[in-house]
Amino acid sequence: GQKLDNTNGDCVDCLAGQYSAGGSTESCSTCSYSAGGTTESCTACPDGKTSEVGSASSAADCTWVPCDVGQKFDNTNGCVDCPAAEYSAGGTTESCTACPDGKTSEVGSASSAADCTWVPCNVGQKLDNTNGDCVDCLAGQYSAGGSTESCSTCSDGKTSEVGSASSAADCTWVPCDVGQKFDNTNG
């Protein structure tokens, strides 16, 4: 559209990034654009792109929205999640950084090395949080693994093999000595 120039009464074309709204000129909002001139509305920027208020005259003037933490910027696709075991502060960073050795992260979740966690331990192991090593639980102990830092002890009269039990249910009765009878309730 055009707007009325109050100084001389002439109609004047709107500028780029503006449109005509009922005889006055309005700036296009963030995430939209207009070529100005006789434009009477703004056009939304393509998905994932934005513009400053009143600044864009075409889709080419729309810029990519800064990426969130855990994402990298791709010139073709915009923001893309970092893969597992990598991190990014977001913004316009074009690459992700690998987590330190022995550490990992969920896809698209880590913003720095501090967000990376030790690789989870297997069932029957505990995590040594000082160096990330997974240590087998001793005989007579169990652990669900993951980031558990200690093993639990099987109940009295029960045992487990080294590094094999994930829960108390995996503990079995200690075998009877010669001359003893097994009691299903007490072992």
Image: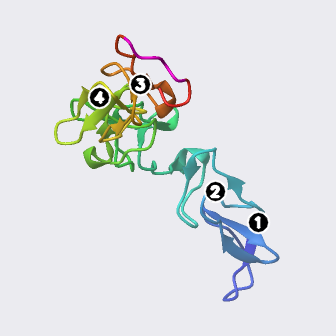
Give the numbered dot on residue 137: 4
Q: Which residue is painted at 60% across and 46% down in the image?
A: 59
The segment highlighted magenta reads 179-183
Q: Earlier in the sequence, mark 1 or mark 2?
A: 1
Query: Is label 1 in contact with label 2 (beta carbons under 8 Å)?
Result: no
Q: Which of marks 3 and 2 is nearer the N terminus?
A: 2
x and y percent of residue 166 in the render? Answer: 44, 28
Q: Mark 3 points at which residue?
A: 165
Q: How far apart are marks 2 and 4 (CA)?
A: 63 Å
Q: Which residue is painted at 17% across and 42% down in the image?
A: 130
**Mark 1 or 2, closer to the camera:** 2
137 or 73: nearer the viewer: 137
Amino acid at dot 3 = Ala
Q: How far apart are marks 3 and 2 (CA)?
A: 63 Å
Q: Mark 1 points at which residue?
A: 1
Residue 139 visible to an observer of this rendering: yes
x and y percent of residue 36 in the render? Answer: 66, 61
x and y percent of residue 42 in the render? Answer: 71, 59
31 or 164: nearer the viewer: 164
Q: Name the dominant secondary structure of the magenta segment.
A: loop
Please tell me whether mark 3 sits on a helix, a strand or a loop: loop
Quadrant of the rendering where the N terminus is positioned: bottom right
Residue 94 visible to an observer of this rendering: no
Q: Earlier in the sequence, mark 1 or mark 4?
A: 1
Q: Which residue is painted at 42% across and 35% down in the image?
A: 82
Amino acid at dot 4 = Cys
135 or 38: nearer the viewer: 135
Give the numbered dot on residue 33: 2
Q: In this view, does 90 lie above or below 84?
A: below
**Mark 2 or 4, closer to the camera:** 4
Q: Which residue is painted at 66% across and 89% down in the image?
A: 7
